[in-house]
Image: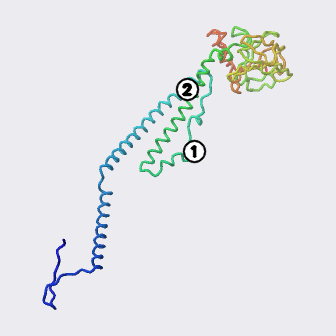
Amino acid sequence: MAKAKYYFNPNTLKYEKVIIGLRKKMFRVIGFIASAMVFATFIVYLAYNFFDSPKEKQLKREIEKLTDQYDQLSNRIKISERVLLDLESRDDNIYRVIFESEPVPRSMRMAGFGGVNRYKELQGFDNADLMSNVSKQMDILEKKIYVQSKSFDEVFERAKNKTSMLAHIPGIQPVKNDGRSLLVSGFGYRIHPIYKTSMMHTGIDFSAPMGTAIYATGDGVVEQVLFDGRGYGNHVIINHGFGYTTLYGHMSKILVRRGQKIKRGDKIGLVGSTGASTAPHCHYEVIKDGKKIDPVNFFYNDLTPEQYQLVIELARLENQSFD
């Protein structure tokens, strides 16, 4: 029990017991409770802001470890990207060149994610930027790996068809010769026989007697058979696949029909001088993906190295063409 308190009453000259009213008691209780709450709030504030509980300390250690793991993962992704970049370079500059395939466009390799915030669910955390960057790196790496995997699938298919491809790509001269006597005018700017001005000559002229056989330079399908009194005259176009077509112009006689399958070395026509021609010859062109290229680079199957070198030298002479 609480001890009773007394006070000296000067009017009665006696010690009287102190009697505390109910209201005063309530005020004291309320004041005590309020003080206790303020003190408790202060203690809690200090505890939450300046002191860590054992659980919080454990969570902070886990967060630090997780952040470190994210940093390590980011570095490993960068290393993987460098390895993938080397694979992409080999793919474009070695494998796809060997198998006559165009490089993968850079826009396809660069995996973009524009327009939509894919990582908004990661926002609001203390390490939001770190988590978003690593997630984005992973997404880009996965997309690049997918593109590279599809590219290797394509190269693999081309490798399986390598024998067929080598048979289809132009590889011989359209008119049989020893590499010296029949080559008249090569690819490039030459003097036009009619206009006597320098004009682009988009093929190679092979001079030969009227009626000399003209041969297909690779396997393929006859795409066009045209009879014309101008330009290339009577001429044949063969589609070899793999982006290659060849043209044989100024024939006196055509021996094939449109849609006919052709093997390398098949006789397709006879030398003539039809169209814009000044003498019997075969005008021969090689077209790759719609672009006319120098046919001299494809005479490797029926010439010795010495003959091939001679053909190259003769083709470079800036003389007059026959068409």
Element at label 2: helix
Residue 245 spot, x, y in % from top left:
72, 21
Q: Disc 2 vs disc 1: Cβ atoms closer than 8 Å? A: no
**Most distant residue in the bottom direction:** 11
* Residue drawn at x 69%, y 10% as measured from the top left: 179
> Given this view, does label 2 or label 1 mark the residue nearer the observer?
1
Residue 91 spot, x, y in % from top left:
55, 26
Amino acid type, callout 1: Gly
Residue 279 spot, x, y in % from top left:
81, 15
Estimate how packed mark 2 is, as few (under 14), some (14 to 19) or many (20 or more) residues with alpha carbons within 10 Å: many
Q: Is residue 289 above or below residue 307?
A: below
* Residue drawn at x 76%, y 15% as measured from the top left: 261
Label drawn at residue 91: 2
Residue 320 visible? The answer is no
Residue 105 visible? The answer is yes
150 and 98: which one is in front? Answer: 150
Real-space CA distance between mark 2 and mark 1, rounded to the nearest whole angstrom: 27 Å
Element at label 1: loop
For disc 1, the marked residue is 114
Residue 252 spot, x, y in % from top left:
84, 14
